[in-house]
Amino acid sequence: MKYVWMLALLSGLTACQKSELVSDFTGNQAVYSLAAGSAYNVNGTVTFKERKNGTTTVLIELTGTEGDAKFPVHLHLGDISTPDAEIALLLSPLTAASGKSETVIKTLANETQVTYKELLAMAACVKVHLAESGPSYSVILAAGNIGTNGTTIANGRTGIAVCQ
């Protein structure tokens, strides 16, 4: 009898602990490739995930990074081959140890609100820089076109313009 009571109590506790996982995301997402932009063997993806509240989560995942460095990440207007392309938004720095960066986007740098669909309609690109400033700033670790530019692939590293 004692064991039956304990089993009933444990079953009740388990039932109370179970909860439905509610996602913040709509299920819509777009994934773009990021190619090596320099002599470093780095590549990966950038994923745009639509959130139910109208914002967008941008997740960058690179392979080939290590150490404790943080690499700046920019969302630029224009193609990756466009020199001095305008920065639409500074994304969260990529952590070298994990190779990841995650940013929730609600507005662009000019404070214009932007939705998931509007981001995917932009002619833009993402670039991961080696450094925030100095000579290493012009070294692009990885880059890729997104939005309406998403089907355009750079012609190797030579097709990726540096940023000024």
Image (cartoon, grey):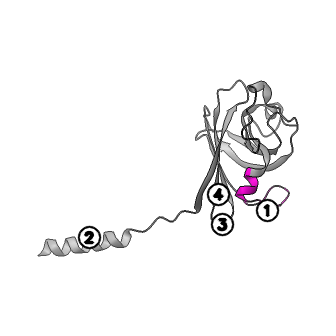
Q: What element carries label 3?
A: loop
Above or below 113: residue 147: above
Give how far apart the Cα atoms at labels 2 and 3 are: 37 Å
In front: mark 2 or mark 3?
3
Tell me where residue 164 appears, x and y as whole percent: 88, 37
Q: Residue 10 carries which label?
A: 2
Q: Is mark 2 on a helix, strand or loop?
A: helix
In front: mark 2 or mark 1?
1
Tell me where residue 53 appears, x and y as whole percent: 66, 66
Q: How crowded is mark 4: few (under 14 residues within 10 Å), some or many (20 or more)?
A: many
Q: Is the C-beta separation of discs 2 and 1 under 8 Å?
A: no
Above or below 7: residue 134: above
Give how far apart the Cα atoms at labels 1 and 3 are: 13 Å
Q: Is mark 1 on a helix, strand or loop?
A: loop
Give how far apart the Cα atoms at labels 4 and 1 are: 14 Å
Q: How crowded is mark 2: few (under 14 residues within 10 Å), some or many (20 or more)?
A: few
Q: Is the C-beta separation of discs 2 and 4 under 8 Å?
A: no
Residue position for label 1: 113
Residue position for label 3: 53
Q: Nearer the viewer, residue 118 or 59?
A: 118
Amino acid under disc 1: Gln
Q: What stretch is highlighted in magenta?
A: 105-120
Above or below 63: residue 146: below
Q: Is the C-beta separation of discs 1 and 3 under 8 Å?
A: no
